[in-house]
Image (cartoon, rainbow, N blue to C red):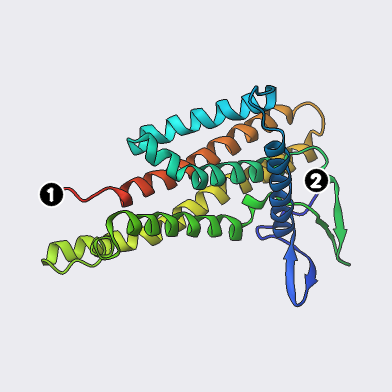
């Protein structure tokens, strides 16, 4: 049975920097999505084909969903690149671990076999990085929308003791969001990989199929949830303060 490791395993070194299987999979995911986007961009036509129609329908549905959260279609269009990128990248990363053949490649390190690929979202560094991007983006967009000092005043308000205490709680909650977003995504994807590893070891034929379908569903839900939580945070930070 394949050894289960909580952290991503190191594959090789590049200039003193260790490249893990999680980082390697992340780089491959990025490369694939960039090449796919370029290929799709070059095939854009006035009369769309089946693939372009599917992409346009998905983008339109996603924009409408964002508009219902933000309350404005213009705002949805403005934030669409960020939210859609987060959703697509996390979704593809979640599904990477269950692609056929992904778990069939190993690297020998002298003591044991290390899987060459690991679902990026099963690496806490990946989910933590996306959580930081999510929280920082929401706050930077909030500063852009309501002004730097107005945004900072939400966290450090010296008007009265109650406002100051609430502001400190808001400031702490931003760090809590990072922990919540990163560990929720990591926990769900890593648990799914462990479950599939055990199931394939015990019953390697048709029995794991329902679990594979379940992991596809979980990967989709977690990517959508991460993107929507980021969008809600942006909506709250960019809304003008009402008195």
Nearer to the camera, 233 or 44? 44
Q: Could you say which quadrant of the image residue 200 lies in?
A: top right
What is the total number of numbered labels drawn onto the structure image? 2
Residue 213 seen: yes
- Mark 1: few, some, or many residues within 10 Å (few <14, many ≥20)? few
67 on left or right of 221: left
Residue 243: assigned label = 1
For the view shown, which residue lies furthest in the bottom direction?
16
Q: Is residue 104 above or below residue 48?
A: below
Which numbered disc, 2 or 1, marks the residue closer to the eye? 1
Residue appearing at x 41%, y 39% in the figure? 76
Local secondary structure at mark 1: loop
Which residue has dot 2 on it?
103
Snapshot quadrant of residue 103:
top right
Q: Residue at x 54, y 59 (%)?
A: 128
Measure the C-alpha gap from mark 2 to mark 1: 56 Å
Density class for disc 2 (Cα within 10 Å; few <14, some 14-19, many ≥20) is some
Q: Is residue 151 left or right of residue 21?
A: left
Relative to residue 121, is residue 169 depicted above or below? below
First in residue order: circle 2 vs circle 1: 2
Q: Which residue is found at the position 40% from the left and 61% from the top?
A: 175
How far from the left and from the top, in percent, is residue 123? 63, 56
Looking at the image, which is closer to me, 61 or 112? 61
Q: Is residue 224 shown left or right of residue 200?
A: left
Determine the residue positioned at 60% across, 32% down.
Answer: 217
């Amino acid at each position: 049975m394949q050894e289960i490791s909580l952290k991503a395993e190191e594959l090789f070194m590049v200039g003193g920097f260790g490249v893990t299987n999680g980082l390697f999979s992340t780089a491959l995911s990025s490369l694939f999505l960039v090449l796919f986007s370029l290929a799709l961009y070059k095939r854009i036509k006035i009369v769309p084909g089946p693939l372009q129609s599917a992409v346009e329908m998905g983008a339109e549905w996603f924009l409408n969903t964002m508009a219902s959260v933000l309350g404005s279609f213009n705002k949805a269009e403005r934030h669409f690149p960020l939210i859609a990128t987060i959703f697509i990248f996390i979704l593809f990363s979640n599904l990477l671990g269950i692609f056929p053949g992904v778990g069939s490649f190993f690297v020998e390190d002298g003591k044991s076999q290390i899987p060459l690929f690991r679902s990026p979202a099963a690496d806490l560094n990946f989910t933590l990085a996306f959580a930081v991007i999510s929280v920082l983006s929401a706050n930077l967009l909030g500063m852009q929308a309501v002004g730097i000092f107005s945004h900072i005043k939400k966290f450090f308000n010296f008007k009265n003791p109650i406002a100051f205490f609430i502001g400190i709680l808001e400031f702490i909650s931003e760090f809590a969001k990072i922990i919540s977003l990163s560990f929720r995504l990591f926990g769900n994807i890593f648990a799914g990989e462990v479950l599939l590893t055990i199931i394939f070891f015990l019953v390697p034929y048709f029995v794991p199929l329902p679990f594979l379908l379940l992991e596809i569903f979980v990967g989709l839900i977690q990517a959508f949830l991460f993107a929507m939580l980021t969008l809600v945070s942006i909506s709250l930070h960019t809304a003008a303060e009402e008195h």
